[in-house]
Image (spheres, rainbow, N blue to C red):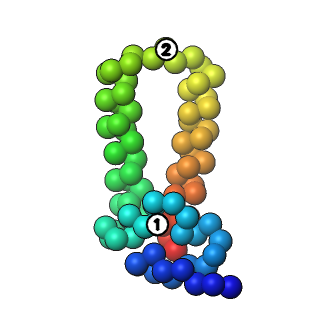
Amino acid sequence: MRIISNGNSNCTDSCDCVGSIGLISGRMGGTARQQTLGMTMGALVFGLALWAVEQPTLTSKIWLIGIVSGYSGVLVKVNNLRQ
């Protein structure tokens, strides 16, 4: 098993270090909770800015999909940042 360094800790070839989360958040520091909160706040600001420009119509189906995918994403991010 090959070891990959993300600058903060070592992890294996699995999905532990894939994407920008491990690379950027690992360099910035902070706990997993602080990093998740920072990414969530950034996504909220981005979403509000997009909402102000586009003003989309959101159905209940879109809300449900957004909530389920957001919850799943948080679980993955917290697990990724713990390592």
Q: Which label belongs to residue 63?
A: none
Question: From the viewer's perspective, is 49 left or right of 70?
Answer: left
Q: Which residue is identified by label 1?
A: 22
Q: Where's residue 61, x and y in %?
A: 63, 22
Compared with 26, 12 (above or below) is below
Q: Which quarter of the rendered picture does the N terminus lie within? A: bottom right
Q: Name which of mark 1 and mark 2 comes first in the sequence.
A: 1
Q: Which quadrant would residue 30 be assigned to in this image? A: bottom left
Secondary structure under tag 1 reads helix
Look at 65% across and 71% down and name the residue there.
14
Question: From the viewer's perspective, is 70 left or right of 30?
Answer: right
Q: Which quadrant would residue 16 be assigned to in this image? A: bottom right
Look at 31% across and 67% down and name the residue there.
28
Give the farthest residue toward the right.
1
- Three-letter amino acid code of the residue under disc 2: Thr
- Three-letter amino acid code of the residue under disc 1: Gly
Q: Where's residue 32, x and y in %?
A: 43, 65
Q: Where's residue 80, x and y in %?
A: 53, 65
Look at 63% across and 75% down and name the residue there.
13
Question: How dense is the environment of label 2, judged by Cα within 10 Å: few (below 14), some, or many (20 and up)?
Answer: few
Q: Which residue is identified by label 2?
A: 57
Q: Is residue 31 visible?
A: no
